[in-house]
Image: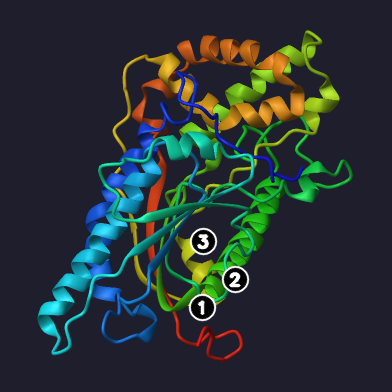
Amino acid sequence: MDNQKIHMNGGDGPKSYAKNSEFQKQLVGYSKKLIDELIDQQLDVGINPHFDPCNPFRIADFGCSIGRNTYLAAQNIIEAVEQKYKSNEEDQENPQLVPEFLMFFNDLVQNDFNTLFNYIDSNKPNYFIAGVPGSFHGRVFPKAFLHFAHSSTALLYLSRIPEKVMDRKSAAWNKGRIHYSCSGAAKEVEAAYSNQFRKDVESFLDARAEELVPGGLMVIITLGLLEGVLASECAMGVTFSIIGSCLHDMANMGTVSEEKLDSFNLPYYYTSQMELETLIKAHGCFDIARFEKLPSPLRQVVHDVQTVILSIRVVTEALFEQHFGKDITEELFRRCAEKFESHPVIYDDKYRTEASYFVFLKRKTKTSKSGTYVGS
């Protein structure tokens, strides 16, 4: 299953991602102070010729999705960069101008860019914008073009489902389950997901290493797990197990075919800090300026099942529709709501073992892979 058609629910209605992404918004908010601090420390204004203020400062948000969150992230970055140029002006014998800003919003072709652009705040026209469709697992910009890259809660999406998970002859065949975190999944399934994640991170970093100028900066915010936590024992694993059980019930009733169920897997991978940090260091093109766990976003506690269902639905519905057809989604999420009503995952903190990680990277002026200067 190739996941080049993954997208969040579009529009701005009650079942849209734009109206049900408060969790993601809080993560962007938590990162603001870190971005302010690290841009001030790491942006080589007045030192690196690639940051000439006479040229536009180019920023890209990879996996931008839709809604106001991506504009909030853009504004946070631009304000920090502006402050850096202004503070540098006071310190330099040759005063530095503040550059103009060019902001690129990147996501797959199926993303609802029309709704995204409807959220533009005309009262803050301090940067120019453009949409750039394409997979961030590959190149989408020219070499040494970007000054800053940003990606929030997008890197957990795999470019494709691991082949071994779909192979009936493989020990990693995930028959009857929809994710490696589902209860009873073989360890080979998680290993296959981990291997695909490694390939995807390498591709992502390869592309950004080409696109960023030497000394360029990048922020990654991603969802993961704390060290030592089993995926099957966290809220994410329990949630996917419940969804899988609902699909099983529907297969038993003939609403979906067993073959369709056995060939469906969700394309998400929740990394640990150690795993992601190891992959970045092994890649060799970036220095890690900061890697830390963000605070956990405030969740609507109590038994608000519909809020939980909506937050799941807006990010998964397109996947279910593509594989099983549009006719099954209403029944699927109705069944999920019924099962969540009686499950403690809704209100028991023992399941809150996911983590959100903030990573701030700086593009090396030389790559340890080839030893050659890049982007001059």
Badge 2 crowding class, 10 Å Cα cut-off, few under 14, some 14 to 19, many 20 or more, is: some
Identify whether 167 is placed above or below 334. below
Dot 2 falls on a residue whose secondary structure is helix
Dot 1 falls on a residue whose secondary structure is loop
How far apart in space, not on screen, are marks 1 and 2 (Cα)?
8 Å
Pick the residue in front: 222 or 339: 222
Q: Quadrant of the N terminus?
A: top right
Q: Looking at the image, is mark 1 or mark 2 earlier in the sequence? A: 2
Question: x, y (%) of residue 221?
Answer: 41, 53
Q: Is residue 199 in sight in this rendering?
A: yes
Q: Amino acid at mark 2?
A: Asp
Q: Amino acid at mark 3?
A: Glu
Q: Residue 291 falls in which quadrant of the image?
A: bottom left
Image marks 1 and 3: residues in contact by CB distance under 8 Å: no
Pick the residue in front: 181 or 67: 67
How far apart in space, not on screen, are marks 2 and 3 (Cα)?
18 Å
| Residue drawn at x 85%, y 44% as measured from the top left | 167
Q: Which residue is mark 1?
A: 285
Q: Amino acid at mark 1?
A: Cys
The tally of labels here is 3
